[in-house]
Amino acid sequence: MRREKGGDREMQTVCCVCRKTKTQTGWKQRQASKEGQFSHGYCPDCFHRTMELAQGWLLARTAGNQGLSLSR
């Protein structure tokens, strides 16, 4: 979480895939506060998984496979 300049509102970063919340000590599986503002991104685990899926999809496309499947 980070505080906005000039205010007490906290910005919480939430993983857009697994919904983990970023804390000062890492990413934790917990429910985000209902107050404050949110920013979405990827936790390290979901980022790497998503990049692997994207790379596989791009390699398949360049090999002539035009199908898009992001499921595991």
Image (cartoon, grey):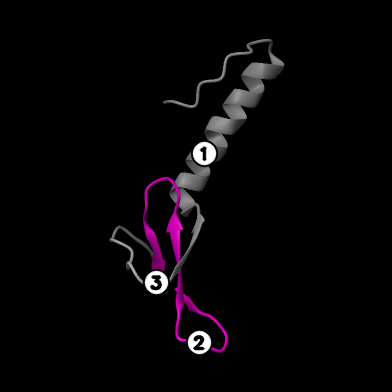
2 or 3: tag closer to the N-terminus: 2
Q: Amino acid at mark 1?
A: Thr
Q: Of circles 1 and 2, which is in front? A: 2
Examine the rendered structure and indicate whether residue 36 appears above or below residue 40: below
Q: Report the disc number at residue 7.
A: 2
Q: Of circles 1 and 3, which is in front? A: 1
Q: Amino acid at mark 3?
A: Thr
Q: Which residue is mark 3?
A: 25
Quarter of the picture containing the C terminus is top left
* Location of residue 38 in the rendering, given as x and y in whole percent from the top left corner: 46, 64
Q: Who's the residue at 37% across and 47% down the image? A: 18
In this view, the residue in front, 8 or 12, is: 8
Quarter of the picture containing the N terminus is bottom left
Crowdedness near tag 3: few (<14), some (14–19) or many (≥20) residues, C-alpha within 10 Å: few
Marks 2/3: CA distance? 23 Å
Label 3 element class: loop
Q: Which residue is mark 1?
A: 50
65 left or right of 29?
right
Crowdedness near tag 1: few (<14), some (14–19) or many (≥20) residues, C-alpha within 10 Å: some
**Where are the magenta residues, as a range?**
1-26
Q: Amino acid at mark 2?
A: Gly
Residue extending furthest left? 30
